[in-house]
Image (cartoon, grey):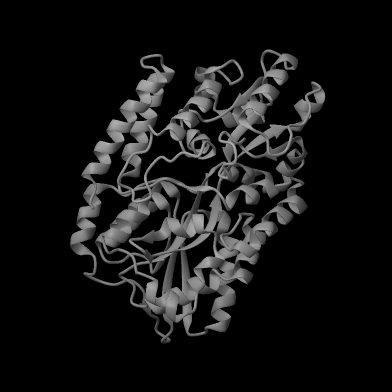
Amino acid sequence: MFLKRGIITGAVLSLVLGLTGCSSTGGNSADGKVELRYAIWDKTHMEAIETLIDGYEKENPNVDIKVEQYSFADYWTKMETAAAGGSAPDIYWMNAVNFNKYADNGMLVNMKDYIKDKNVDMSQYLESLSSLYNYKGDQYGIPTFWDNNILMINTKLMKEYGIPEPKENWTWDEMIAWLTDAKSKLPKDIYPFTSYATEESQAGVFNEIASAGGKVISDDKTKAMLTTPETKEGFKRYFDLVKSDLHSPHDITVEVTAGTLFKSEKALVLQMGSYGLLPYSDKEQAQVAGNFKLYEIPTIKEGNKSKTVIHGLGNVISSNSKHPEEAFDFIKYISSEESMKKYTELALVPQAHKNVQDLFGQVMKEKTGVDTSVISKVAEDAMPLPTSFETSKWDKAIMDNINKFMQGKVSLDQAIENAQKEMQAILDKEKK
């Protein structure tokens, strides 16, 4: 998963708060060039990033940009420690889960004036992504690559067992009927459906909440919305499926993992993040790419356009940077339509610019044989990943209560009620 949900720790954040601004990152090299440091966590993006850096440096010979790549396991610890010492990289990847804390604590440059002065049109990016990096009305990050969630269906199994292809733009009831028919044709050791029901909300129930027209958190991030009728409907539809014999048994799913069940052809359908397609960009894996097709998560509420949750990274500037103007100029360069086209082609990930959405599908079709057009189709109306200051805490509260339901300790209604109370208590303690 390339858009991780790690979150900054409170203890280090307090230290950051006291020390931010004590010293600065970046500087000038011996030959007088402006030096910028750029931190990322995914090495599979290096070719794309270095290509864009080469292009930028040719146009701006006075700037020297160095990439620092860390494993995700180390990334946030590195960023926290660097921020505490005033030596954070000039530019770095930010995810939505951490963003609010970093922005609120003065660790990021407010891009409002730069966006205005450099004539950057924020409407050219998917609003569901740019909104993730907007804090109190100001923009602190420019969105880059993203993922959402879809259904991956094994076409080989459909053909082998005489299962018809699902209809386009199907409803939840139509999917359940289709899965029921599929179950009657599949061997007992192949499950019609599998998903990450208790392991991950982002790839799991949040999508059904979006499809039902619900919300996890209010727009102002102060109210838990788990007990609203639409949100409860999303919970109910999804977990009715998870608990049924159409879904892989919970103990098997957790032990083996949904992804492994699908890859080993023990599940017909997998609900997954679009990042799960990345392994198929490898030449050796591409040969099996023709064995599946991608579909939308079905509509639960009639007329509702949102069918998935979306999350994308943002490029941000450290408030410690000695060269924020040059840093923003580089971000503007890599956020242009032309640059995002190059990035899409080289890294095989969809980018935030509205004009390059179709390109991802074209490139993936050419290189892997997989039609990914559905991923871009559902992106524009997707629900932005729900976040606040303490996202990880209330997300855990939701999943802990769902686990109690899955273990038969409480009803689903009680699990939702309990999660609502716990989430609201966490939100009430957040900074306002």
Where residue 80 appears, as percent x and y from the top left, is 30, 55
The residue positioned 75% from the left and 52% from the top of the image is 367
The total of numbered circles placed on residues is 0
Q: Which quadrant of the figure has residue 150?
A: top right
Viewer-proximal residue among 254 and 155: 155
Figure check: 317 above or below 27: above
Q: Position of residue 344 (x, y in %)?
A: 64, 60
Q: Is residue 421 left or right of residue 283?
A: left
Among the 4 quarters of the image, the one containing residue 186: top right
User: Closest to the observer: 300 or 266?
Assistant: 300
Is 9 situated above or below 397? below
Residue 287 found in image quarter:
top right
The residue lying toward the viewer, choosing from 56 and 110, is 110
Residue 240 shows in the view: yes
Residue sitting at x 23%, y 42%: 428
Q: Position of residue 257 (x, y in %)?
A: 54, 27
Residue found farthest to the left: 18
Residue 69 visible? The answer is no
Above or below residue 365? Residue 355 is: below
Q: Residue at x 54, y 38 (%)?
A: 211
Q: Residue at x 64, y 66 (%)?
A: 342
218 or 205: nearer the eye? 218
Q: Position of residue 274 (x, y in %)?
A: 60, 44
